[in-house]
Image: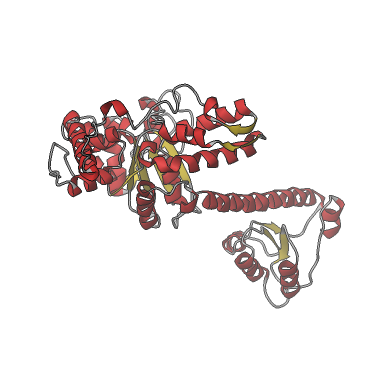
Amino acid sequence: MERILVRVGHRVSCARDATEAMAIVTSETVDLVLCDVRMPGISGLELVRQIREIHPDVPCIVITGYGGPEQSVEALRAGAYWYLEKPFDQGSLDVIRRLVEQAIEHGRLKAENKHLQRQLRHRYRFENIVGSSGALREALEVVEKVADTDSTVLITGESGTGKELFARALHYNSSRADRPLVTVNCGAIPEELLESELFGHVRGAFTSAINHREGRFARANGGTIFLDEIGDMSPNLQVKLLRVLQERTFEPVGSSKPVQVDVRVVAATHQDLELAIREKRFREDLYYRLNVIPIEVPSLRARREDIPELARHFLQRINEDKGKQVEGFTDDALVGLTAHDWPGNVRELENLVERLIIFRGEGRIGSEDLPAHVGRESVHDSAGAPALPAAGLDFNHVVDRFESELIRQALDRTGGNKQQAAQLLGLNRTTLYEKMKKKGLSPDAGSDPGH
């Protein structure tokens, strides 16, 4: 076997027993172990177990002259990649060569997958979500507290705020991080296909179902499923999702046999689900099942102080990706970016920075590089400011009255809905509550059900 494997290009180390083999495995980089079952001292199966403890990604193939179903099952239970039965003939040597190649490739893919998982964990650590504003930190504190639990999470916020980034942070900072994270955009898949995507189907379930298909819930077993834009799900599917949350079982399309899953559910929406409940578009019982842990991702307007840091972050990353050398932003450009309302939130900012880098190419991005609609807004519109009396005024009192009036107008315009009022004012909902409490405004004002 050594001669055959060396002949096809492998570097081979040989050992007389398990003790010698362990010395080689612990001192060299080994891609594959082939070992006999019966050896002096430690058996081959025990050697496989010991190797798996220190190098779980190294595949092992066991060789036995005492074949049979029981021996084969025992080898696989010990952690062997596969087993071979002696004696060998010329045909089996070809099989060995192919099996060795497959086992080495399997080990490399396994190690590469773990490396990518470590990179993802690093990328989605809490500190890698850019920003230091109070509104962002408040949301991240909730993520940190609940990440390593199995509680269902509902992430709300405007489009483009980074809700999926929060979902990934929840998954990769949990005990499920080594298991799959499966993402489903419920608003992007047609209603007639979404049920099959979520739960799978059996052969013959419908005209084009020529094979059995595994659904996203089954693929996420042991891990996390992220249901983005959950507010777009049809009432029929809402009932089936409610059952999964309650019983942890589902039935593939065309089957009456329930499938049990161990999945953590994280859902997200930009819609006001409480309004959707009142309009009979979303089930109230499903809402309460999803809203076990609510996390509200603030809009970019609600954390303007993060805009310069985000812009620099995107500039550095896009420079690397596009091979550009744009040096940074002028102070005037950062002022203009900070003044913009960003209806598309972080996604809009990222796209604009990429466009600015491509057009600028080098040097620094100035205010003259910004599009006409960016930086032209002003949160300090002097036309609406109170006149300054000759005798002066109480600045804090005037500002307090001005804020109170804006809050009242926002509540009036939204019929008392504090969630929508906060969005109109570019505030986090909790921040709005705190301001109302501080100003003595009734927290029960308006019609904000459930709050």
Task: Answer above or below: position of 11 versus 242.
Answer: below
* Residue at 51% in and 33% down: 333
* Residue at 74% in and 72% down: 23
Q: What is the count of numbered marks?
A: 0
Q: Nearer the viewer, residue 248 or 89?
A: 248
Residue 28, picture quadrant: bottom right
Screen quadrant of the C terminus:
top left
Question: Outermost residue toward the front?
Answer: 390
Q: Nearer the viewer, residue 177 or 155?
A: 155
Residue 304, picture quadrant: top left
Look at the image and tell me whether residue 260 can be seen: no
Look at the image and tell me whether residue 398 can be seen: yes
Q: Nearer the viewer, residue 162 or 134?
A: 134
Q: Is residue 201 left or right of residue 17?
A: left
Q: Is residue 61 left or right of residue 450?
A: right
Q: Nearer the viewer, residue 32 or 132?
A: 132
Task: Answer above or below: position of 235 versus 89.
Answer: above
- Measured as percent of width and height from the top left, residue 220 is found at 44, 45
Q: Is residue 107 left or right of residue 448?
A: right
Task: Answer above or below: position of 206 versus 50.
Answer: above
* Residue at 60% in and 61% down: 79
- Measured as percent of width and height from the top left, residue 39 is found at 72, 73
* Residue at 38% in and 47% down: 136
Residue 376, picture quadrant: top left
- Measured as percent of width and height from the top left, residue 49 is found at 61, 68
Screen quadrant of the N terminus:
bottom right
